[in-house]
Structure formats: C-alpha cells, structure tokens
Amino acid sequence: MPGPGVVIRYNAGLTTRDLAGTVIQRTGALPNASVSIVGTVDNAGTITAGAALVVDGEARFTATTNGSGVLPTLRAPAAPLTAVIFPGPAGDHAVTPIDLTNTVPGVIIVAPTISKPTRLTSSTGASLVGAVLDAVPTGVLARAGAPTIRRVAGANGQLTVDLAPNAGYDVRLSDPNGNRAASLVVAATSSNLATTIALEKATRVQGRVVGSTAIPGAIVQFLCAEVTCTGLERSRPIAEGVTGIDGTFSLAVPDPDSN
C-alpha cells in the first residue's frame, strides 16, 4: 500500500487494441482455450512522492475463446506483448509473441509443446528411479499463472516433459528416495534441456524438532550460506521437508566434500 503522501496515477493516454475476433489456432481453431496477454508497458503511469517518477508497468489480460476459437472483446496496450495460451488438456500450454503496436493479428498461431526426454542420475551415473522433475514456469509463463509441471522418473531414470517454445523454466530436480542425490535447480527451455542430468552427491542430515514435546508437521529447510550463493539463491532452500509424527526429519543436502 502506498505510504503517506504517495500518489499513483495511471497513464490515461495509453493506446489500446481490441483483440475481439482474433482466432486462436493450432492445426485448427482452438475452442474454449484460456488466453492471457502479458508483457511490460512503457510509461504506464507516475508515482509522486515529492517529485513525480514515470514508471513502467506489467500487463495481464485474460479471456476464453468461444466454441469457434475466437476471442471476445479483450483490450490490451498497443505494444509488443506475449500471448500465453492454455488449450485445455492438462499440461498443454503455448507462448506466442504478438505485436499490437500498430495492428491486431487476425490469427494467433499456437505452437505445440515439445516433448523432451531426459535421464536423471546420481553424481556417479546411477539411474535415479523415482526422482522428481518440477518444471517451474518463469518469465511470461509465470506472469500468466502457468502451473508447475511435475514428472517422476521411471525405469533407468527416464522421463519426458513437454515444454513450450519461447518459454523458460526453472527445472527443480530432487530425489525423495533417500540420500542418493541432493536437490538441483537448472534453468531450461524447450531447446536446451539436457538429455542426461546428474544430481549432486548428497549427505543425509537427520534430526528431530521438539518444543516441550515432539513437533510433527514442522517444515524444515536448509539454505545456502556460502559466499558463492547470491541473490535468490540465498533464499531458495537447497533441501526441504516436513517432520514426521515423532518430530523427526531426514533430508539429502549437497555433500560439502564434493565441491
């Protein structure tokens, strides 16, 4: 909430475009698809706290196509933006850049997701059956509220995850089956996800959380305090878990002797 004496004014002179009538299309029109138009808008308004400061803003406008894949009235700033489309089936999503600076596209083409197979291993190359991959949307996907995609490795540590072109993800890898490997976060896109990813060597840390008695259901996090950890890395847990009914926990953390 703005503090005393702070005045926020939106730029009433921003030009907008109406996407009413635009068709959302893949191999054919996509009926009942959820569409979010997101992006950054220059000169979105001013913040005045003594002196006036011109600021940019973030835009997000949503609508659903009709039975013929056509958008209803949907006004968005006249600027380069991005359409994030959720066609319907769980996990299906697409990212398409659009430029509304001078005109409105008659059709927005929805690229299919790309299936990316990968194998999860320990630091020694052993397959991690049951290891978990979470593809956490970043950038425009995060602005559009896209959900995390979770896959569990099967035989030989193999799994396949469907990622959208023009999108970015934080791929979080973990091994919930003991201390074979520590959690790992890597940035990825549909074009650069590695075919094999080795998780770091881990050390098991066990303990018990108590007050006057054991505390079940407590969240236990380990954070990186090394000088090499900066920015968001210092606030992201390197291991996280919940205590059991007797207050005990067991977590795999990166082995300090392996770095």
Image: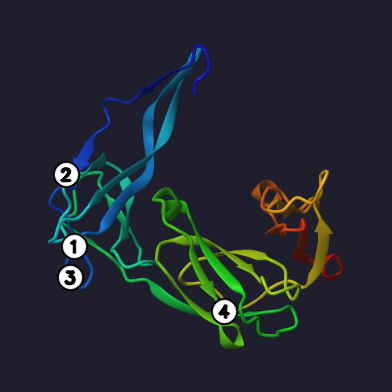
Could you say where residue 145 lies in the image, as x and y percent from the top left? Answer: 41, 51
Whole-number angstrom distance, CA of label 4 to CA of label 1: 33 Å
Q: Residues within 10 Å of mark 1 (few under 14, many from 20)?
A: some
Query: Residue flagged by tag 1: what amino acid is it?
Result: Pro
| Count of numbered tags | 4
Residue at which label 2 appears: 73
Going from the N terminus, do you reach mark 4 or mark 2 first? 2
Residue at which label 3 appears: 28
Query: Residue flagged by tag 3: what amino acid is it?
Result: Gly
Residue at which label 4 appears: 153
Residue at which label 1 appears: 31
Which residue sits at x=32%, y=60%? 86
Q: Mark 3 falls on what kind of element?
A: loop
Query: Residue flagged by tag 2: what amino acid is it?
Result: Thr
Figure quadrant of residue 237: bottom right
* CB atoms of marks 3 and 2 within 8 Å: no
Instruction: Give the label, 3 or 1, closer to the camera.
Output: 1
Going from the N terminus, do you reach mark 4 or mark 1 first? 1
Q: Mark 1 falls on what kind of element?
A: loop
